[in-house]
Image (cartoon, helix red, strand yellow):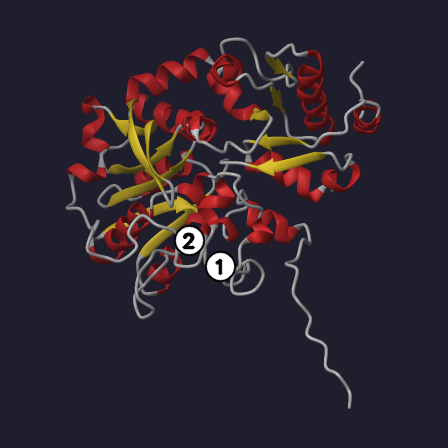
Amino acid sequence: MALSAQQWLVKINELPVTETIKIMNVCGGHERTIALSGLRSVLPEWIELIPGPGCPVCVCPEEDIYQAIQLSLEKNIILAAFGDMLRVPVNAGKQAIRTLSQAKAAGADIRAIASPIETLTIAKENPGQTVVFFAAGFETTFAPVAAMLAEGAPENLLILSSGRLTWPAVALLLDSEQPNCDALIAPGHVATVMGPEQWQFVVSRHQLPVAIAGFTPDSLLAAIYSVLRQRMDNHLFVDNCYERVVKPGGNRRAQQLLSQVFEVSDAPWRGIGSIPSSGYTLKAHFSRHDVQQHFESFRDDARRHVGEMPPGCDCARVVMGKIKPVDCKLYGRLCVPSQPVGPCMVSDEGACRIWWSAGIKPEVELKSTELT
């Protein structure tokens, strides 16, 4: 019988550990469960949970967002994008249109979608018009995109691809001089597609414990207990704590479709730079659906801060687990969900937005007034 969250908490608290253990979770969904269920407040003080690079919207290249904005304004197209992409700002002047939402308000035909399959309906309902799907996401998003194209998407459907693989960012982080974690909780949905074996490099190359978790408190606590025991016993492996969904080898058909439609290439991550073998690019056979083959590029490298986070924004360091959201000087002050400065405050998978939704406010220094 599976243990409850309360039972896992008891087992964790019984562990004879006194040193601080930093555990990084590589998924916005994990961070949402951790923050909104208050796991940090009930775990022992010696456990530090660190949100990692699990938000595709947060790392979507600034130049891709700019390209999408300009396409929607300058060309006679319908642009479809996931809802949280519409509010991510680019680094442009205050008088310029800086988000897809602003472009929509200016008259661009921009449709917010929740699933890639919705773009098929839009394309079929508008056969005489070009539909551009601004696709940003990780493996779990791009597997259905690959299936959609492999099965024969309408010719008027084009893809602006901002697809990224999850593990290369983790590899970059762990290869750095200050990886800032002692163990890793790997994302269950990515492992469902790509297989748990994809995370073996964390054990083999970096000698760190890994556990794959689902999205409930009990699954996350099981994974936390696993990595702690691995450290204590000095027996490191990739532990699958989400066996109900994650199977050895992953989803072979999804992997086949990804390989059929996309090639893996070096790719930029906003505020981080280019990461080797981390992006999905359409293969030549599917180039007729590549927006770059149909329209000129609007990626103007002369713009200031191209590819960077907005000035003063620490989203890149939050994404890479270097700082907590509350450590950013803009968090909760100049940057709030109603007026986000950086992408981490926009997306539901961004750590800043999640922490704010969980009621975690910045520490504001209160100035006292002395009565005379």
- Report whether 52 appears left or right of 227: left
Mark 2, secondary structure of its residue: loop
Whether residue 140 is visible: yes
Name the residue that disc number 2 marks. Answer: 88
Residue 8: % across, % down: 79, 24
Q: Relative to the observer, which residue lies in front, 322 or 2?
A: 322
Q: Mark 2 and mark 1: span between their CA atoms?
A: 8 Å
| Image mark for residue 340 | 1
- Report whether 259 appears left or right of 312: left
Q: What residue type is labelled 1?
A: Pro
Label pair 2/1, CB-CB below 8 angstroms = yes
- Report whether 112 appears left or right of 152: right
Placement of 295 over or under 102, stated as above or below: above
Q: How crowded is mark 1: few (under 14 residues within 10 Å), some or many (20 or more)?
A: many
Of the 4 image quadrants, the one containing the C terminus is: bottom right
Whether residue 83 is visible: no
Of the residues under marks 2 and 1, which one precedes in the sequence?
Answer: 2
Mark 1, secondary structure of its residue: loop
Residue 338: % across, % down: 53, 62
Image quadrant of residue 58?
top left
Residue 102: % across, % down: 37, 62
Of the 4 image quadrants, the one containing the N terminus is: top right
